[in-house]
Amino acid sequence: MPLVQYVVTALQCQVEDFPALVPVEGAEPRKFERSCEGALHVRPGGSAEITADELAHLREKHPRVAAAVRVLASDEELAASRAAATEPPPAPAPTEPPDEGDEGSGGGDDAPDAPKGKKSGKR
């Protein structure tokens, strides 16, 4: 189902005249796919996942409403983002434990201390 957004400047409305069947050329009609029961409520600035059948019906029967609908993501893009969200994160790379035999200065840091700056008493 494509993710769509109704533009902010459009009027709020509801669409109720969805058909029960979709004619298929050379075959029997198939069932009209719906994203929800009842009317499709379109609110300014609102987003929703609607079916391709609903989007096609809006474009065919309600061109003013369809002109105010922007497709944000297609079915394929939504499926890819959902698959990426459900994949487990990659395992962290194994780290090597510190070498136990090294008994240097005890601090574990071989770099000399950095010179400290002078503090000024003035502010």
Image (spheres, rainbow, N blue to C red):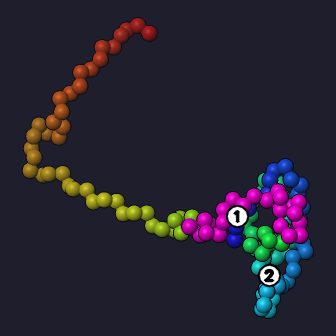
Residue at image mark 1: 3
Q: Secondary structure at mark 2?
A: loop
Q: Earlier in the sequence, mark 2 or mark 1?
A: 1
User: Quick check: can you spot residue 42?
Assistant: no
Any magenta on residue 74? yes
Mark pair 2, 1: CA separation = 18 Å
Any magenta on residue 45? no
The quarter of the image holding the C terminus is: top left
Q: Nearer the viewer, residue 72 or 46?
A: 72
Q: Is residue 33 left or right of residue 17?
A: left
| Residue 53 position by quadrant | bottom right
Which kind of residue does numbered mark 2 sit on?
Answer: Phe
Task: Measuring from the top left, give residue 9's x and y in whole percent.
Answer: 84, 49
The residue at the point 80 percent across, 81 percent down is 32
Query: Where residue 123 is drawn, which disc sits there?
Result: none
Q: Residues within 10 Å of mark 2 (few under 14, many from 20)?
A: some
* 86 w.r.t. 27: above or below: above
Q: Secondary structure at mark 1?
A: strand
* 115 w.r.t. 72: above or below: above
Task: Measuring from the top left, give residue 74's x and y in whole percent.
Answer: 66, 66
The quarter of the image holding the N terminus is: bottom right
* 33 w.r.t. 65: above or below: below
Q: How many marks?
A: 2
Q: Are marks 2 and 1 in contact (CB under 8 Å)?
A: no
What is the span of residues highlighted in magenta in the rendered image?
59-80
Q: Nearer the viewer, residue 82 or 21?
A: 21
Q: Residues within 10 Å of mark 1 (few under 14, many from 20)?
A: some
- For the stretch drawn in magenta, the main secondary structure is helix
Residue at image mark 2: 32
| Residue 52 position by quadrant | bottom right
Q: Is residue 110 left or right of residue 71?
A: left
The residue at the point 20 percent across, 27 percent down is 113
